[in-house]
Image (spheres, grey):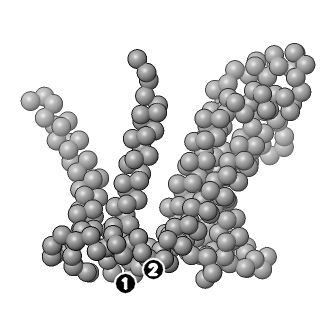
Amino acid sequence: MKQLPSIAYLTAIYSFFYIPIIVLVVYSFNQAQYSLVWHGFSLRWYQELFTDGDLWIAVLHSLFLGICAATAAMCIGGLTAICLYRYSFFGRKLLYGLIFILILSPDIVMGISLLILFSLLQVTLGFWSLLLAHITFCIPFVVVTVYSRIVSFDEYIFEAAKDLGAKDTIIFTRIIIPLLWPALVAGWLLSFTLSIDDVIISYFVAGPDFEILPLKIYSMVRLGVKPEINALCAVTFGLTLVLVIISQLTLRKKP
């Protein structure tokens, strides 16, 4: 009886999170279109999903954009975190504070500001504007992730390496990068997730010639939630679940 409130609380929380997802998956098999009334089981929407060429082009665009943005953000953010940790320079604390301001800044503010910047620089809206925008909002998350890892290092490791004659390039490639590798991978995955998921900033800086999946879904939802969208979300959730299971099996400690 003492555990009843805790069980009820956890049940309510998990129900709030997962019941909408379950409903979404169930209605992806609904025969009806634009209806929340069950009209029978059907795989029609999955067939339409896998034969929708425009949708798959948007998926490929999003994947390519996410990989490019995450890789660039990982490199720039990783180097920034290392510089903030190892070197003292004028404005160091200000730069570190500005990184947190970018994280807390509303997406709509960043989207409009980037649109104004691209307009002033006469940058054509399309792939490059999306890539620059995604790199911009991903870098702060990489910096925070990598910096939280690097501050846990024993600073005498670098001093010992210098005493043994190692130059900065050797310290960077042989010591810092191997130790930071988990944080860099985590920053890359976080950046890729943010890029794939972004709608607001992409809405302001996207062009007509390069459509990505979030904006494609947004344009489809404006006409009504079709079961095809439910099928797409169900497939995405299934792939995410598989990746989580694989990661848990990989990270599980062997007896």
The residue at 46%/33% (across/down) is 250
The residue at 71%/43% (across/down) is 78
Q: State the image coordinates of residue 205 (x, y, percent, origin top left).
A: 63, 74
Tell which of 137 and 246 is nearer to you.
246
The residue at 72%/47% (across/down) is 75
In the picture, the disc for residue 223 is 1
In the visual, does 129 lie left or right of 145? right
Disc 1 residue crowd, few under 14, some 14–19, many 20+, Cα 10 Å? few
The residue at 47%/31% (across/down) is 251
Verify CB contact (< 8 Å) between mark 1 and mark 2: yes
Specify the amino acid type for callout 2: Ser
Disc 2 residue crowd, few under 14, some 14–19, many 20+, Cα 10 Å? few
In the visual, does 175 lie left or right of 56? right
Q: State the image coordinates of residue 213 (x, y, percent, origin top left).
A: 50, 70
Label 1 and label 2: CA atoms lie apart by 7 Å
Q: Is residue 137 visible?
A: no
Specify the amino acid type for callout 1: Leu
In the picture, the disc for residue 219 is 2
- Quadrant housing the C terminus: top left
